[in-house]
Amino acid sequence: MNIKVLQSKLKEGLNIISRASLKSTTLPILKNILIKGENNFLSLLSTDLEIGINWWTLAKVEKDGEITVPFNVLSSFVNLLPNEKVDLILKKETLSVQCEDYKIQINGVNTKEFPIIPKIEEKNSINLSSKSFCEGLSQIIDIPSLSKVKPEISGILLCFTKEGVKIVATDSYRLAEKQINIKNKSSNLSFIIPQKTAREVVNIFKDLDEEMEIIFGDNQILFRANMKEAEHPYIELTSKLIEGEYPDYKSIIPPSFKSQIILDREEFLNKIKAASIFSGRVNEVNLDINTEKEEIVIKSQATDLGDYKAKIKGRAEGDKVNVSFNNRFLLDGLVNIKSSEVVFEISGDSSPGVLKPVGKSDFLYVVMPIKS
Amino acid sequence: MNIKVLQSKLKEGLNIISRASLKSTTLPILKNILIKGENNFLSLLSTDLEIGINWWTLAKVEKDGEITVPFNVLSSFVNLLPNEKVDLILKKETLSVQCEDYKIQINGVNTKEFPIIPKIEEKNSINLSSKSFCEGLSQIIDIPSLSKVKPEISGILLCFTKEGVKIVATDSYRLAEKQINIKNKSSNLSFIIPQKTAREVVNIFKDLDEEMEIIFGDNQILFRANMKEAEHPYIELTSKLIEGEYPDYKSIIPPSFKSQIILDREEFLNKIKAASIFSGRVNEVNLDINTEKEEIVIKSQATDLGDYKAKIKGRAEGDKVNVSFNNRFLLDGLVNIKSSEVVFEISGDSSPGVLKPVGKSDFLYVVMPIKS
C-alpha cells in the first residue's frame, strides 16, 4: 500500500468512522480500523459488531493494499498534522504515516483478523432528504429507554408508506410520532432500528445537503450517501435491526379531547423547568387548567425545601381540569416542538395529555398523567 | 427583609459566590448561602470553611434582614427568570422570591447557624491590576500537586518585594516563576496560598478592569475589588493561608547553560504533543539537540504500538546534547509561554532544562530530565 492523501480529508474520514470504533473492548481488534487503498479510492472502515461505518475518498493510490491499525493512535497523530499531503506506506504489517517533518510507524494487524460487515441484499430502498430525515429523528431520539424486557420499544420504529415516513418512539410513559414526506413512493414496510444507530445516523448525515438512500434487508438496514464528484458511495452505515413486533401504538393516541389550551411554547417550557426545582423525587408538577379564565396555574412542592407557583395565559376551550405530570416528560415534549406556540389537549385527570405544534401536523407527543 | 433587585444583578452575584458553595457536604448548612439586606445594599455570602466569598450590590432595601437558603434552589430559580425586578421578602424563616408570574417560597435556616468568616486585620496591603495578576496566576496555577507530605508545595507562593510580585509554583519535578510589576512599593512579605484559592481568584477577578487590593493577615489573605459607582466593596474573597516554609526554590534555577536553542513555540508544542501518542507509561520523549545542525530531533516509542520521529529547525549555540523528559511536563511549560518563540537551555543530560519566552524575562519554567 502506498497512498497520498490530504490531511484534512483523512481527518474528515477518521472523524466519521470514529463513531463505530470502540475505546475499550474485550475484543482488541475492534479498537482497530481497516484502511484500504484500491482503484484510486482510499477507504476507512470501523465496526462495533452492531454498526459498521465505511467512508471513501478519491486519493492517489500508487499501490493497492490494506491493513488494520489502532484508531486512537492514527487519529491522535493525524489531528496534530498540518493540512498537507500525508503518505501512508505499508511495509509488511507496519504502516508508516508521514507528513512534512512528522513521522510515525504503527504496528498493524492483518485484515483477516477484522470482522466482516455482512453485505445487504439491495431489494427495497427509498431516497429522501438527509436533512429532514435527521431533523425528524433527532426530535424523538431521546425517548426510548433501554429495556431488556421489551427490546422492541428500546428502538425507534420507521414506517414507510405511500404518504411518507413515520418515525415513532416510546418508553411506555410517553410516545412521539414524527411524519416526513418523501417524493418517490414506497411500499408499506416497517423496521425497528436501535437507538444508537439512530444517533449515529443523525451525527453522520445531518450536515449533508444531498439526498440519502435507505436500503432494507432482512435483518439489516443500510444508510448511504454518494459522492458529489463521482458515482461512488461516500458514506455507508450498516446496522442490525431489532427483531420483534412494535406495539400497536396508534391505540394510545387519544382520538379526541375535552380540554384544549394554546400557549406560548417558550414560556410554558420555562415555567415547567422552574417547577422542577421543587418537583421532588417523582418529578411531579401540577397543572390547573382553567378554560374559563384561559390560563394554567403550575404548581410544585417539596416538603422540606418549599414550593413553586406560576401562571400562564393562553387561548382555551372545553372543560376545566386539574392534572399532574412528570415534569421531565413534559419538558422532553416541549423542547422537541419547533413552533412558537403549542397546543395542549386532554380529556380529564386520568387521560394522557397531547402536545402538538401550532400550524403543523407533522409531530405529536403523548404523555401519561401521574394518577393521584 | 424586603428587597427589590434586578434579576441580572442577582444572577451575577449568585454566579460569583457559587464558587465557595458546596454541592455535597457533611455539614448541610454549607450548601446554603447568606442573603442580607442592609443600608441599601444587598449582599450574598458563601463559604466552604477554607474560602469565603462576599458580594454586594446597590438595591432597593425596603426592610433590612438576613437569612440563609440552599444555594442551588435559589440559583436554579433565578437563572430561569426574565430580566425583571425580583422581590425578596422574608416572613419568619420563609423567603419568598417573586418575579412577574413566577413565585417560589424557600424554607430558610437562621443565620446563627451559618459559619462566620473571620475578619482580617488590615495591616499590610498592596494594589495591583486584577488582569495582570490573574493572567500571571493562571500561567502557573496547574503546577502544584496535592501533597500531604509537603503541604507547602501544594500551594502557590506569592513574594512581594519593592520590585513587584513573584508568583512561584512547583511539584518538585518542575517549577515556574512569574514576575509582575506593581506601582506602589511593598515591604518584603511572602505567603503560600492554596491552589483552590488561586483558581477562584482567577475565576472571579480576571474580567475586572479595575485594580484589586490584596490584604495580608497573620493566617489569612483577602482579595478585594471595590464598586465603580460607590465607595464600597464589590467582591471580597477571604482565604486561609498555608502554614510552613516554602523550599528555597532559587537554588533549583540553573544560573547558566551549556546548550541553547531558540524554536518556534507552536511547532515545538505540536511536535511534543504528537510524541505523546507513543510516549508510553512514563511519558518519555527524547530530544536530540544538535547545535551544529541547529535542530532538535524528537523521538518517542511504545514497544507494542510503534514509534514517532519529528525534526525542528532553530537557532542554536553551545554543546550537542541528548536528553529525555516527561512529555507532559514539557507541554505544561510550553502552553504557558505566550511569546511566538521559546528559548530552551540545558547543561548536559542530567541537568534541568529551562524554558523561557523570547523577548520577555517575566516567566521561567524549569523541568527535571528523566535520567537514563
Image (cartoon, coloured by chain):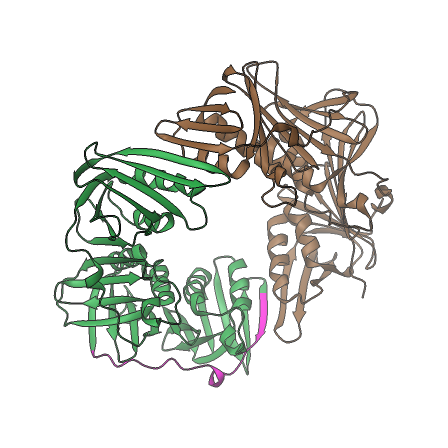
Chain colours: A green, B brown
**Extent of the magenta region:** A103-123
Query: Is residue B206 something that shows in the picture?
Result: no
Q: Where residue A18 appears, x then y in whole percent? A: 45, 66
Residue at horizontal 63 percent and vertical 62 percent from the top? B275
In the rendered view, tell whether residue A92 sits above or below residue A285: below
Q: Closer to the camera, B358 or A265? A: A265
Q: Where residue B250 appears, x then y in whole percent? A: 85, 41
Q: Closer to the camera, A313 or B153? A: A313
| Residue A73 shown left or right of residue A292 in the figure | right
Answer with the quarter of the image where residue B239 lies.
top right
Q: Where residue B157 appears, x then y in whole percent? A: 77, 38
A348 in the magenta segment? no
Residue at horizontal 41 percent and vertical 48 percent from the top? A283
| Residue B148 shown left or right of residue A259 in the figure | right
Q: Closer to the camera, A355 or B165? A: A355
| Residue A24 shown left or right of residue B121 in the figure | left
A118 in the magenta segment? yes
Q: Closer to the camera, A104 or A340? A: A340
